[in-house]
Amino acid sequence: MWDALVVTPLTQGLIFLNDLIQGMGAPYSWGFAIILFTLIVKIVTLPLNLQQARSMKATQELQPKLQELQKKYAKDKEKLAQAQMELYREHGVNPLGGCLPMLIQLPILFGLYQALYKLASTGEIVGQRFLWIPDLAFPTRGMGIKWVWPPAPEFIGWATAALYLILPVLTVVTQIVMQRMTTPPTASRDPQQAAMQQTMLIMPFMFGFITLQVPAGLTLYWVTSNIFSMIQQYFITGWGSLLPRKKDEKVAKVVKREAGTSGVEEPTGRKGRKDGKGKRRKKKR
């Protein structure tokens, strides 16, 4: 059932894209087929991804009000949940709206993983290079991380291993950038939110470790997907907390300029203000 609905269509789709690119006389046809496949998936799921990004942005904007509710109903979890749902409903925010794109992409990710192994078992992508990557089917099933472990007989040498390690490193970097872009510039005062953000810092390295054990073609898909998501996220929410200092400096300049041109004087007391000689001036009536 799973093979018929997911793995086989993905396998045939990759073969079709490879034949199409190969027919155009382009080199590295399998690598470009995976990239083109990734772009097709991202374009098809674009409406859902946009909904996810907007939902996350709206939820971040509601954080101050959510924190107020947490203080107000700190001792009544039921009323807190009701108040939060009412706040979400009032602003048209679905707190679970960001889950759907991930739920859709997970079957594609697992299906592509099996499709690449299927293509490797039939010899379709074994030995197929892409740019600096010697073999899109490497590492093979069951090898784990032995290929980067010198004592293991599967160790391929650091010169070759370095070529394969580029993609896992790119996976970690792009995951970190994506996390920073989707995080608001201001730090959350909510202890639970702060703890969750600390936990999320580990996730990119977990993904990086996983990519050491799957075919390079799958890691190529993941990196391409991350880059596309970064571009999409930039046009929706900007850099997020990736470049908070520049944003804060820009805001400070705007505030300073507005304060300088508003002509509003700071209050100095109820009885008036002292002049340059230290004498108190009387208010004009």
Image (tube, grey):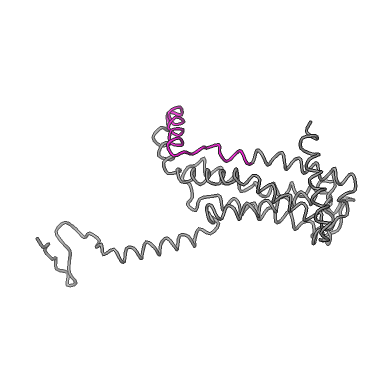
Observer-nearest of 258 and 166? 258
Residue located 73% across and 48% down the image: 209
What are the residue bounds of the magenta stretch?
A: 75-101
Percent position of residue 37, x then y: 74, 49
Image vertical order of residue 47 relative to residue 230, above or below? above
Observer-nearest of 68 and 112? 112
The quadrant of the image that shows the N terminus is top right
Percent position of residue 101, x then y: 62, 41
Q: Quadrant of residue 165?
A: bottom right
Task: Locate residue 260 relative to residue 6 in the image: left or right.
Answer: left
Image vertical order of residue 209 relative to residue 73, above or below? below
One can see residue 142 in this view = no
Q: Quadrant of residue 26?
A: bottom right
Q: Any magenta on residue 239?
A: no
One can see residue 244 in this view = yes
Observer-nearest of 187 and 94? 94
Instruction: State whether the magenta stretch is mostly helix, strand or loop.
Output: helix
Image vertical order of residue 153 relative to residue 25, above or below? above
Q: Quadrant of residue 281?
A: bottom left
Q: Any magenta on residue 84?
A: yes
The quadrant of the image that shows the C terminus is bottom left
Percent position of residue 28, x then y: 82, 59
Q: Residue furthest left?
A: 285
